Image: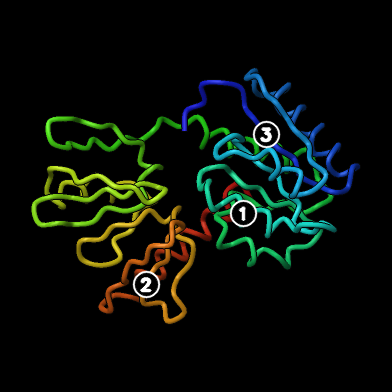
């Protein structure tokens, strides 16, 4: 996403010394590498963050996993209900919770104690993502044309000579185009995966796989089937994409 204003960053940690050290490290990175204005808000627990949270209010959230009140995992689950885009960086003194963070589309995972080198690495990778040119999908609906950022598309579905574009929160539009045209555009982006004939999903919008791995469950609650032929390859592609997100910056 292209930034058109100051970086808005949240640090959530119930240990004041860790919170302050991380905040200093982020400020230092901006001082040494980036002249973009920034706002860093610190919260002592997940509930305090949720009390002021609005979708896409923050560009990056550094979220401690182990907290006395609401855990970082539980906090992230609530955030992801309405916000699939904000970069979540989990922080913890142990890597045993990395698997729990996996379904929440974590951008990175930082082990305490923080080092300036590690903080800088995370911020460098985050800046690349936040300042990358926005990919756009052109949708023709009746006599109107809409320009939709790819990050806002949850899925594309074939409907005869039309394509249904499903947006992040479940609303959709029926576009006058062949499915092959939409497929050519979307499949050039690493976020998108064809899970069955006539269905392309945005993997950033997937909540989980069904227990029998026959379908994907999206953040808005919708389900899409995974075709039986080549299912293992499709699931492998999804898992590898999620792993690549987890490893970004490491």
How much space separates mark 3 and mark 2, taking CA atoms? 35 Å
Do residues under tags 3 and 1 come within 8 Å of each other at their CB atoms?
no
* Rendering coords of residue 113 (x, y %): 84, 50
Q: Earlier in the sequence, mark 3 or mark 2?
A: 3
* Rendering coords of residue 42 (x, y %): 78, 36
Figure coloring: rainbow
Local SS, label 2:
strand
Q: Which residue is mark 2?
A: 215
Q: Which residue is mark 1?
A: 78
Q: Which residue is mark 3?
A: 9
Of residues 22 and 155, which is closer to you in this image? 155
Residue lying farthest left? 161
Residue lying farthest bottom? 212
In terms of image quadrants, where is residue 19? Answer: top right
Local SS, label 3:
strand
> Between tags 3 and 1, which lies in front?
1
At horizontal 63% and vertical 50% (from top left) the residue drawn is 108
């Amino acid at each position: 996403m292209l930034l058109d204003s100051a970086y808005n960053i949240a640090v959530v940690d119930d240990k004041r010394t860790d919170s302050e050290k991380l905040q200093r490290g982020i400020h230092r990175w901006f001082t040494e590498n980036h002249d973009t204005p920034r706002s860093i808000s610190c919260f002592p627990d997940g509930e305090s963050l949720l009390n002021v949270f609005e979708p896409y209010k923050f560009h990056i959230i550094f979220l401690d996993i182990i907290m006395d009140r609401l855990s970082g995992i539980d906090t992230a689950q609530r955030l992801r209900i309405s916000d699939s885009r904000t970069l979540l960086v989990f922080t913890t003194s142990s890597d045993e919770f990395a698997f729990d963070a996996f379904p929440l589309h974590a951008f990175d995972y930082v082990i305490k104690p923080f080092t300036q080198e590690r903080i800088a690495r995370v911020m460098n990778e985050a800046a690349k993502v936040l300042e990358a040119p926005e990919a756009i999908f052109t949708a023709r609906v009746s006599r109107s044309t809409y320009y939709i950022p790819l990050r806002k598309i949850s899925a594309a579905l074939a409907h005869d000579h039309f394509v249904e574009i499903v947006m992040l929160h479940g609303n959709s539009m029926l576009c006058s185009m062949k499915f092959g045209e939409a497929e050519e555009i979307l499949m050039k982006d690493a976020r998108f995966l064809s899970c069955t004939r006539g269905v392309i999903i945005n993997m950033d919008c997937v909540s989980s796989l069904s227990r029998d791995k026959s379908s994907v469950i999206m953040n808005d609650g919708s389900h899409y089937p995974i075709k039986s032929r080549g299912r293992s390859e499709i699931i492998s592609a999804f898992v590898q994409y999620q792993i690549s997100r987890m490893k970004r910056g490491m």
